[in-house]
Amino acid sequence: MNPRARVDSAPIPFIDVGAQRRRLGRSIDDAIARVTSHCQFLGGPEVAAFEADLAAFCGARYAVGCASGTDALMLVLMARGIGPGDAVLCPAFTFCATAEVVVLLGATPVFADVDPVTFNIDPSSLLRAVATAKRHGLNPKAVIPVDLFGLPADHDAIAAIAKSEGLYVLDDAAQGFGATYKGRKLGTLAPATATSFFPAKPLGCYGDGGAIVTDDSALVEMLRSLRVHGQGTDKYDNVRIGMTSRLDTIQAAVLIEKLKIFADEIDARDRVAQRYAAGLEDVSIVPVVPDGYTSIWAQYTIRFKPGIRDALAAKLKAEGIPTGIYYPKPLHRLEAYRSFPVVDNGIPVTDQLAEEVISLPMHAYLDPPTQDRVIDAVRAAIKP
Ligand SMILES: Cc1ncc(COP(=O)(O)O)c(C=O)c1O
């Protein structure tokens, strides 16, 4: 085999966490070593330091670390007292955690449709979801918009509906953290924003982790209690039912180092997205970033007419190029979520997107030659 052919078909990673690890080098080793020397594995000084850095990064007053993005969502809903009889409105085109936390608290998710261009919750469908919830005898209490694939939802439109309908807004920014909407970073666009530090996320740690960002000091106090078993003045003075959901000190130490290069990585991700758009916009539907928005590009997701993407994925796989389908089944089609209400006239855009989307390798360290290999392979694979 000639060596050039071998390079051209060598498998490439979907997300290259190793490249970032190499860039961070000793700074991460030293940060972890500091924690293993002081041995405050929970509640060490790095946790508060990271929380302060994270809040400052997005221009919010507070950040509260916790054990995962799922817990971040859960803790806020717990703090709001969401429970049986309540409806929480959310898109069905998202990762299951968005609705899972609602069900775990005994409340009911009501699924709204998404916008075909942004893939995010469609404000007109959100309004219909309020009506649907009421028709089911539920109290619509909150909405969880998701900043899917890294692009912010239409937060102004959502805030206006939330105000008129009395809904609390919990932004699920697990995929979008770092992106901006009308000049403001996610974390400042809703009363509470949840994010995830799952390793593959744009700002990921070396295990599980999450955080809530907010300006609301009363919420912060409640979250700090809820994440340690509902503690009061101390951990053996339990004043409410809570859970165990702390951000480990080692993860906070890792995140402090990663946050230092995050802005630079955001620029790099954007360059990768631009190159994909230039190389693929004439042969696929490439993502659109509306004016006044930026995306963090958690995924680079393109669309084809139904029936094309599975063959495309197989051809790319044979050439060492991985792809992902987010999400092959929207939540209302999943066995665990099938019984929950969907806005009355259905959610056809969600169903259509689930048939058409395919995500390409995307990370800050995707170099132009490797990316061109992906672009060329996609173009060759879909040629009639
Ligand atoms: C939209 C969305 N919400 C919530 C989560 C949950 O985050 P975690 O995996 O940290 O619990 C994820 C993570 O994949 C996600 O993509």
Image (cartoon, rainbow, N blue to C red):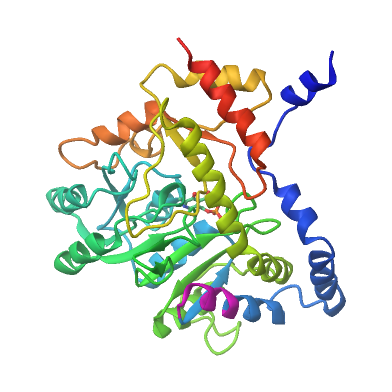
Asked where in the image residue 35 lies, by quadrant, the reply is: bottom right
Secondary structure mainly formed by the magenta segment = helix
> Could you say where residue 240 lies in the image, as x and y percent from the top left?
46, 77
Q: Considering depth in this image, is 101 or 271 the residue closer to the camera? A: 271
Measuring 52% from the left and 76% from the top, which residue is drawn there?
55
Q: Position of residue 89 (x, y in %)?
A: 28, 53
Question: Who's the residue at 34% across and 69% down the image?
Answer: 190
Residue 205 rendering spot, x and y as whole percentages = 67, 59
**Residue 65 shown left or right of residue 369 in the figure:** left
- Is 55 covered by the magenta stretch? yes
What is the tally of numbered marks visible in this picture? 0
- Confirm whether residue 368 shows in the render: yes
Which region of the structure is painted magenta?
Answer: 52-60
Determine which quarter of the picture holds residue 368. Answer: top right
**Image quadrant in which the C terminus is located:** top left
Q: Nearer the viewer, residue 325 or 208?
A: 325
Question: Left of 213 or right of it: where is 135?
Answer: left
Which residue occupies 77% across, 78% down? 40
Quadrant into which the N terminus falls: top right
156 or 162, nearer to the observer: 156
199 is higher (above) or lower (below) than 77: above
Is 37 a magenta residue?
no
